[in-house]
Image (spheres, rainbow, N blue to C red):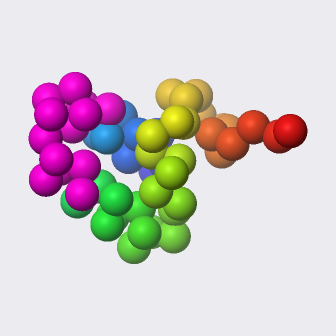
Amino acid sequence: MLVSLQRRYRAAVHAGNITAKQALYREAVYLGIQPELLEGGTDHTGGSGVTAS
């Protein structure tokens, strides 16, 4: 599910579609996903997109 959101977010960024980006942030929040994960996540399944320090 996160991977799908990340892909759609990248497509919205590439297209310059601010309305779509806002909708994806709202969808992430609704699903209990931190919106920040949309921006910096990788496209690999099984990972959370968060790196340990």
Please check the rendered image and state whether residue 47 is part of the magenta-colored stretch, yes or no.
no
- The image shows residue 11 at horizontal and vertical percentages of 24, 31
**Up-down: is 51 above or below 29?**
above
Whether residue 21 is visible, yes or no, is yes
User: Residue 1 at what x, y percent from top left?
Assistant: 46, 50
Q: Position of residue 36 (x, y in %)?
A: 51, 51
The residue segment tinted magenta is 10-22
On-image quarter of the C terminus: top right
- The residue sitting at 32% across, 32% down in the picture is 10
Regarding residue 4, the answer to whether it shows in the image is: no
Front-lying residue, 45 or 49: 49
Q: Main secondary structure of the magenta part?
A: helix
Q: Residue at x 24, y 57 (%)?
A: 22
How many numbered marks does the figure carry? Answer: 0
Q: Is residue 3 left or right of residue 53?
A: left
The structure residue drawn at horizontal position 69% and vertical position 42%, both measured from the top left corner, is 50
Relative to 33, residue 51 above or below: above
Residue 44 quadrant:
top right
31 left or right of 46 in image: left
Residue situated furthest right in the rendering? 53
Between 24 and 46, the residue placed more toward the observer is 24
Rendered image quadrant of residue 31: bottom left
Q: Residue at x 29, y 39 (%)?
A: 8
